[in-house]
């Protein structure tokens, strides 16, 4: 398959373990954050989002944590499965119509 | 479910050709975007649009133009394709869902310029 990015940070986890993917953002005015998953050759897929008035939000097997003090965002995936192997991007935006700012991505590899 | 569709998954064109990449969304979103994605460079914003007939330059607009005649459709145009425009092109739309302004992507068009 195609690579969506070379020289990306890579996280390798054993199947069944939990994964934590981190993202630092720079704009203290950012108030909305999204995590995307991108599989090889496909467009980014929305996973979960969080507003700045929250510290934590949970979805199905995923949790997003937001630490505004240190401008840090993390995505936790519980019981990681082979189908979770992909590149994960965080994105941030400020209120209004400003375009999202994307991180470079982290490649998650799940070892069966 | 939000659906963003792109006219082609794969496209091969020759240098100097005019290329049209079409994107359609079915969620009545105001905002639409065109990105290109290259290994090691991440997602780069080419153009975006907040409304019909409106367009704004992104980070790398050179060599591209766009058209938004209808709310659901946003077209990217390569006036004279060049080999350095070989890339994955991603369209996205963004609009209010509840109290969030979630952005959704299309499947991408892999363009090769020979």
Image (cartoon, helix red, strand yellow):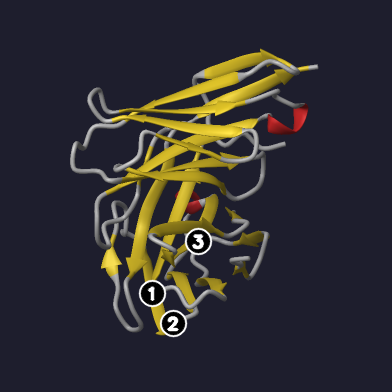
Using the image, determine if residue B15 lies above or below residue A65.
below
Q: Which residue is tagged 1?
A: B30
At horizontal 65% and vertical 40% (from top left) the residue drawn is A39
* Label located before the other in sequence (2 or 3): 2
In percent of width and height, residue A89 lies at 48, 36
Q: Which residue is tagged 2?
A: B71
Chain ID for label 2? Answer: B
Name the foreground residue: A74 vs A98.
A74
Q: CA distance from mark 2 to mark 3?
A: 14 Å
Q: Secondary structure at mark 1?
A: loop
Q: Which residue is tagged 3?
A: B91
In percent of width and height, residue A51 lies at 35, 46
Residue A99's tag is: none
Q: CA distance from mark 1 to mark 3?
A: 14 Å
Name the foreground residue: A60 vs A85.
A60
Decide: marks 2, 1 in contact (CB < 8 A)? yes
For label 3, the crowd category at 10 Å Cα-Cα, with few meaning under 14, some 14 to 19 and many 20 or more, is many
In percent of width and height, residue A42 lies at 65, 48
* Label located before the other in sequence (1 or 3): 1
Q: CA distance from mark 2 to mark 1?
A: 7 Å
Decide: marks 1, 3 in contact (CB < 8 A)? no
């Amino acid at each position: 398959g195609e690579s969506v990015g070379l020289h990306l940070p890579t996280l390798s986890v054993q199947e069944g373990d939990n994964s934590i993917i981190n993202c630092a953002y720079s704009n203290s005015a950012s108030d909305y954050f999204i995590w995307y998953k991108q599989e090889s050759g496909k467009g980014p897929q929305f996973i979960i989002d969080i507003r700045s008035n929250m510290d934590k939000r949970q979805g199905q097997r995923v949790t997003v944590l937001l630490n505004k003090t240190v401008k840090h965002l993390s995505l936790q995936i519980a019981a990681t499965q082979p189908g979770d192997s992909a590149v994960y991007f965080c994105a941030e935006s400020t209120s209004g119509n400003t375009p999202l700012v994307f991180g470079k991505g982290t490649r998650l590899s799940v070892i069966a | 479910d939000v659906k963003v569709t792109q006219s082609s998954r794969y496209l091969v064109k020759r240098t100097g050709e005019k290329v049209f990449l079409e994107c359609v969304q079915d969620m009545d979103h105001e905002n639409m975007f065109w990105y290109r994605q290259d290994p090691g460079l991440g997602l780069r914003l080419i153009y975006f649009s907040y409304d019909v007939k409106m367009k704004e330059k992104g980070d790398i607009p050179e060599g591209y133009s766009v058209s938004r005649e209808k709310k659901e459709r946003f077209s990217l145009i390569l006036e004279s394709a060049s080999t350095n425009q070989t890339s994955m092109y991603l369209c996205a739309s963004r609009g209010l869902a509840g109290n969030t302004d979630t952005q959704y992507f299309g499947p991408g068009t892999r363009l090769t310029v020979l």
